[in-house]
Image (cartoon, rainbow, N blue to C red):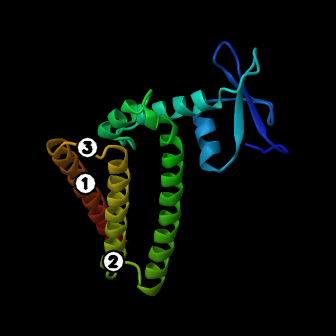
Amino acid sequence: MAKNEGQIVIKKYANRRLYNTGTSTYVTLEDLAEMVKKGEDFTVQDAKSGDDITHSVLTQIIFEQESKTGNTLLPISFLRQLITYYGDQMQMVVPSFLEHSMRAFTEQQAQMREQVNRAFGETPLGKNLQLPMQMVEDQVRRNTELFQQAMQMFSPFMTPPAAKESRKAEAKDIDELKEQLRALQNKLDNL
């Protein structure tokens, strides 16, 4: 999709169709998701009222992505905890905290990719991939610990059984990630 000069405006009509005013074409939510992934900035406006409805459309994209694939990004425990903050005193703090956390996570991912690229550059592909895989596992562990610490700031009176269940679920998630990394390592070894 071609970019126009300045801000891209998407108009949403009553029939729920989305129109990209920059390219003069109708687009889908999937097209908007691709635009986000490419870093294209846009706003969505209600065609009749002119109201900015970008937030609700982005939320709709997340909802569709979560329900379309079996690989969800938002665990149930996270969603439940997020819901508890609506109407709470902490509601004002959560958005900036989540934005900061995602920015930090993105920066860490970029650093990790750089380290993996350096490691692959130093080691022939197919040989010992243990070092890059260990780095990935370590990064996942650090990110999980960072997230746990941050969430404890918001709920310092978490009961031990709930914390235990949360740790079990997170351990299961980490085990699943390790298994996926092992499968990836096996695929790379076979190359």
- Structural distance between the alpha carbons of marks 2 and 3: 42 Å
- Report the residue that reaches farthest toward the bottom: 122
Q: How far across and down, in percent of the image, does residue 69 sit?
A: 39, 37
Q: Mark 3: give few (<14), some (14-19) or many (20+) Cα within 10 Å.
A: few
- Structural distance between the alpha carbons of marks 3 and 1: 29 Å
Q: Which residue is mark 2?
A: 129
Q: Quadrant of the N terminus?
A: top right
Which badge, 2 or 3, comes first in the chain's sequence? 2
* Residues marked 3 and 1 touching at CB (< 8 Å): no
Q: Amino acid at mark 3?
A: Phe
Which badge, 2 or 1, comes first in the chain's sequence? 2
Question: In the drawing, does residue 29 fall left or right of residue 3?
Answer: left
Q: Which mark is residue 176?
A: 1
Of tags 3 and 1, the one toward the viewer is 3
Numbered disc 1: secondary structure: helix
Q: Amino acid at mark 1?
A: Glu
Report the number of numbered marks. Answer: 3
Q: Quadrant of the C terminus?
A: bottom left
Q: How far across and down, in percent of the image, does residue 187 sit?
A: 33, 66
* Residues marked 2 and 1 touching at CB (< 8 Å): no
